[in-house]
Image (cartoon, grey):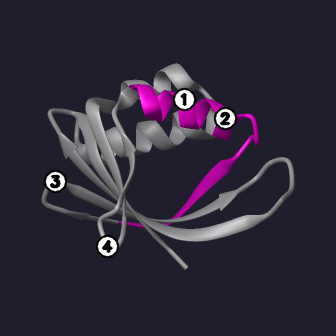
Amino acid sequence: MTIEQVVQQQIEYYNKQDIEGFASTYADDIRVYTFPDNTITLSGKQELIERYTETFKKKNFADIKNRSIVGNKVIDWEIATSGLTGESTSLMAIYEVENNLISKVWFIRE
């Protein structure tokens, strides 16, 4: 599986609100950071499952507007929309993929 396929698969699971599938695309020691200060906002697969179980209750949907690949990183410009409120947020996500799993993510928000 290519790194782009790994990231695309997690987006598809995200859009289906499939927590098991979504979590299966991440490494056990996943770290999520804010950019540019590198503050860790999520650490470990269990925390990811807990946070996204709550997120999926909002019926969120991610639409990829642009994707670039550099080495083992996939950089997506996403529009995330709440299925409950219709509110949208534009963000950039940088996914680092190692051994066919997402190991690190950086989010850049407005």
Q: Which residue is drawn at 75% across and 40% down?
A: 59
Which amino acid, mark 4?
Answer: Asp
- Indicate yes or no whether the magenta region holds residue 66: yes
Q: How crowded is mark 4: few (under 14 residues within 10 Å), some or many (20 or more)?
A: few
- Vertical comparison of 40 with 44: above or below: below
Q: Distance between the residues labelled 4 and 1?
A: 24 Å
Q: How crowded is mark 2: few (under 14 residues within 10 Å), some or many (20 or more)?
A: few
Q: Name the residue under label 1.
A: 50
- Residue 72 image label: 3
Q: Between 110 and 18, which is closer to the camera in this rendering?
A: 110
Q: Residue at x 30, y 38 (%)?
A: 30
Q: Between 19 and 100, which is closer to the camera in this rendering?
A: 19
Position of 30 compared to 98: left or right?
right
Q: Could you tell me if residue 62 is visible in this image? A: yes
Q: Residue 45 at x, y = what percent?
A: 37, 29
Of the numbered discs 4 and 1, the one sitting upstream in the chain is 4
Residue furthest bottom as drawn: 110
Which amino acid, mark 3?
Answer: Asn
Of the numbered discs 3 and 2, the one sitting upstream in the chain is 2
- Indicate yes or no whether the magenta region holds residue 49: yes
Q: Could you tell me if residue 25 is visible in this image? A: no
For the magenta stretch, what is the residue range? 46-67
